[in-house]
C-alpha cells in the first residue's frame, strides 16, 4: 500500500536533508508549519522533522490539504509512485489500481474533458466503477477523481508558470471543460488565482538559440544517474535524415512530430537540451502542437525515459551489470513509427534497417517547415502506408514478408484495432502484433519495450543478446536467454539495454 503513513519514516527525512535527486518524484514532503508540499530536491531550508509528512503521490499531499511549492514546483518532478512499485509482488487489485492510474494519466495527456471517464476505465478493466474506486483508494490513498484533478491542476500550473498562454488556453489544454470550472478548482486547491501564480512563481530560464524564435519552452526533470551520451548515441545511430537531429556536443536532440486528433493532424517539432547539473531537460515545442501539449510532453518523457527509477532498477540489475546504472531504455514519440522501424530492422544490421526506413521517409514523408534546416520531413503516417501497394515497397528494397507486415500494421492502426502507446494493455497488444503477418515474438517484444514502455520486455531471439550472454551456440539459445533473464524481472527491458551496451566482439548487431 502507498498510504501516507507508510512514508512517514526517518529514511525519507535523511534523503530530504541531503536533497538527493535520486529520490525526486519518489515521495513528496508536506510541511505542517507552512501547509506546503515539496520535492526532495527543494532548495529551501530543511524543515524540522516533526513538521514533515511524507507522501508517495502529489495527489495524496493535496488531499491532506497541502499546496505545491512555488520554488521546487512538484509538477516538474519525474513520475513516481506508480513506477516504483515492485510489480512482480503485487496482487490483482494493486495491478488494476496501477493500470487505472495509467489510464487516468492518458486522460490528462489527451485533454479529454467528458464526464464518465472513471466508469469507462472501469469497464475497460472489466470491473465495476465502485470496485475501481475501492481498490484505487486502498492502493493510492486518494480517489480516482482526486488523482485526476491533481494531475490536471499540476499540468495547468506548469503551463501557467512556464508559458505566456492565456488562462482560457491553459484550462482547455489541461482538460477542464470551462474556464469557470478551472478557476474554481485552482483557487479551491491552491488558494491562488491562476493569473496570480505568474507573479508569485519562479520561472526556470531555458537556453535559447537563434533558431528558437517561437514556440513553448518547458522543463522536465529526471533522476540521476542518466547516461546522456549513451542515450543520444543510441538515437543518433538510428536517426533519420530530415526527421531527427542529434547534437552530442550540445547534449541536445530535435525532431519533427505529428499528432492525430479527432478533427485534424497537427504537425510540428520538438527540441530537448539536457542539463546534467540540474538533472533536467529544457524542452522547446512548436506552438502548432499547443492543443495536444500534455500529450506531447508525455511522449517526450517516454522518448527519453525520464521517469525511470534507477534505485529500483539497480537493486535488481547492478550485481550483473555493474557500472551501467545510467543507461535508460530509449522510447519513441510515435508508436507506429517505432513499429515500422522494428519491422524493417528484422534480421539486418542497424545501418541496413536505417537505410530502408530512410527510403520510406524520402518516398512518403510529408514536408514540414521548422526553425532547423535539418528538420524538414515528417515520418509517413499510418494512413499513408496503409494505402501503398506492396510493389511500391518492393521497389524500395523491402522484402516481401516485410511488405505484408508493414501494410497490415498500418491498416490495423488506422482501423483503431491496435494501440501502440504507453499504457496499452501489454498482453493483448503482444497477441495482436503477433497475429499480423511477418511479426514474430522478437518484433513484438521490441515494440513493447520501446513503444509501450513495458519495463519487463524480453526479445529473447535477439542475436546480439544471445552473443552478449554467451549462449548463441547452445541448442536452444532463446530459452537460455529467458532462463538467464528470469532473475531480472520486472526490469528485463533495462537488462536488455545493458547487455547490448556490453562489449560485443562477435560483431552481432543490436536493433
Image (tube, grey):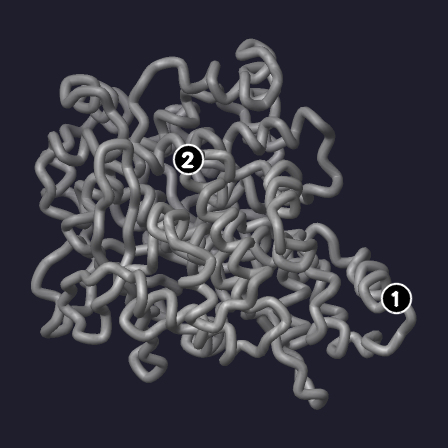
Crowdedness near tag 2: few (<14), some (14–19) or many (≥20) residues, C-alpha within 10 Å? many
Instruction: Single out the residue that lies furthest toward the front.
Output: 391
Residue 147 visible (yes or no): yes
Identify which residue is drawn at 32% across, 75% down.
241
Q: Nearer the viewer, mark 2 or mark 1?
A: 1
Identify which residue is drawn at 39% across, 64% down.
279
Residue identified by numbered label 2? 106
Q: Are marks 2 and 1 in contact (CB under 8 Å)?
A: no
Rendering coords of residue 479 (x, y %): 85, 61
Rendering coords of residue 484 (x, y %): 83, 64
Q: Is residue 344 above or below residue 130?
A: below
Q: Quadrant of residue 395?
A: bottom left
Rendering coords of residue 153 (x, y %): 29, 31
Identify which residue is drawn at 75% across, 39% down.
89
Residue identified by numbered label 1? 476
Where does the C terminus fall, quadrant-wise? bottom right
Q: Name the element at disc 1.
A: loop
Q: Nearer the viewer, residue 91 or 29?
A: 91
Cα–Cα gap, marks 2 and 1? 40 Å
Amino acid at each position: 500500500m502507498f498510504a501516507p503513513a507508510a512514508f512517514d519514516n526517518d529514511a525519507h527525512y535523511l534523503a530530504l536533508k541531503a536533497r538527493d535527486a535520486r529520490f525526486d518524484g519518489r515521495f513528496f514532503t508536506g510541511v505542517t508549519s507552512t501547509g506546503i508540499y515539496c520535492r526532495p530536491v527543494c532548495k529551501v531550508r530543511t524543515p524540522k522533522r516533526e513538521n514533515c509528512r511524507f507522501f508517495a503521490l502529489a495527489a495524496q499531499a493535496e488531499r491532506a490539504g497541502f499546496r505545491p511549492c512555488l520554488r521546487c514546483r512538484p509538477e516538474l518532478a519525474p513520475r513516481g509512485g506508480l513506477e516504483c512499485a515492485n510489480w512482480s509482488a503485487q496482487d490483482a487489485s494493486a495491478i488494476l489500481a496501477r493500470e487505472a492510474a495509467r489510464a487516468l494519466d492518458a486522460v490528462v495527456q489527451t485533454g479529454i474533458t467528458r464526464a464518465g471517464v472513471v466508469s469507462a476505465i472501469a469497464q475497460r478493466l472489466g470491473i465495476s466503477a465502485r470496485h475501481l474506486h475501492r481498490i484505487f483508494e486502498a492502493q493510492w490513498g486518494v480517489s480516482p477523481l482526486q488523482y485526476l484533478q491533481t494531475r490536471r491542476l499540476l499540468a495547468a500550473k506548469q503551463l501557467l508558470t512556464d508559458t505566456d498562454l492565456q488562462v482560457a488556453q491553459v484550462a482547455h489544454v489541461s482538460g477542464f471543460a470551462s474556464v469557470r470550472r478551472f478557476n474554481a478548482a485552482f483557487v479551491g486547491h491552491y488558494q491562488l488565482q491562476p493569473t496570480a501564480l505568474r507573479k508569485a512563481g519562479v520561472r526556470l530560464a531555458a537556453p535559447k538559440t537563434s533558431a528558437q524564435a517561437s514556440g513553448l519552452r518547458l522543463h522536465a526533470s529526471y533522476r540521476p544517474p542518466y547516461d546522456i551520451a549513451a542515450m543520444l548515441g543510441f538515437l543518433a545511430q538510428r536517426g533519420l535524415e530530415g526527421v531527427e537531429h542529434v547534437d552530442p556536443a550540445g547534449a541536445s536532440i530535435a525532431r519533427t512530430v505529428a499528432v492525430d486528433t479527432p478533427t485534424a493532424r497537427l504537425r510540428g517539432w520538438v527540441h530537448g537540451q539536457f542539463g546534467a547539473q540540474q538533472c533536467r531537460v529544457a524542452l522547446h515545442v512548436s506552438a502548432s502542437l499547443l492543443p495536444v501539449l500534455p500529450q506531447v510532453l508525455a511522449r517526450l518523457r517516454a522518448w527519453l525515459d525520464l521517469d525511470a527509477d534507477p534505485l529500483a532498477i539497480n537493486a535488481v540489475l547492478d550485481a550483473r551489470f555493474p557500472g551501467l546504472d545510467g543507461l535508460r531504455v530509449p522510447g519513441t514519440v510515435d508508436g507506429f513509427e517505432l513499429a515500422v522501424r522494428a519491422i524493417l530492422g528484422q534480421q539486418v544490421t542497424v545501418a541496413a534497417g536505417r537505410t530502408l526506413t530512410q527510403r520510406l521517409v524520402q518516398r512518403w514523408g510529408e514536408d514540414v517547415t521548422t526553425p532547423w534546416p535539418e528538420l524538414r520531413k515528417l515520418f509517413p503516417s499510418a494512413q499513408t502506408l496503409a494505402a501503398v501497394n506492396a510493389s511500391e515497397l518492393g521497389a524500395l528494397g523491402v522484402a516481401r514478408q516485410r511488405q505484408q507486415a508493414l501494410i497490415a500494421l498500418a491498416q490495423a492502426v488506422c482501423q483503431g484495432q491496435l494501440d501502440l502507446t504507453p499504457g496499452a494493455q501489454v498482453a493483448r497488444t503482444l497477441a495482436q502484433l503477433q497475429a499480423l503477418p511477418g511479426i514474430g515474438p522478437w518484433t513484438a517484444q521490441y515494440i513493447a519495450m520501446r513503444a509501450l514502455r513495458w519495463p519487463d520486455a524480453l526479445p529473447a531471439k535477439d542475436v546480439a543478446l544471445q552473443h552478449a550472454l554467451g549462449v548463441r551456440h547452445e541448442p536452444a539459445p532463446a530459452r537460455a536467454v529467458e532462463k538467464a533473464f528470469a532473475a531480472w524481472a520486472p526490469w528485463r527491458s533495462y537488462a536488455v539495454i545493458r547487455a547490448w551496451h556490453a562489449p560485443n566482439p562477435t560483431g552481432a548487431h543490436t536493433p
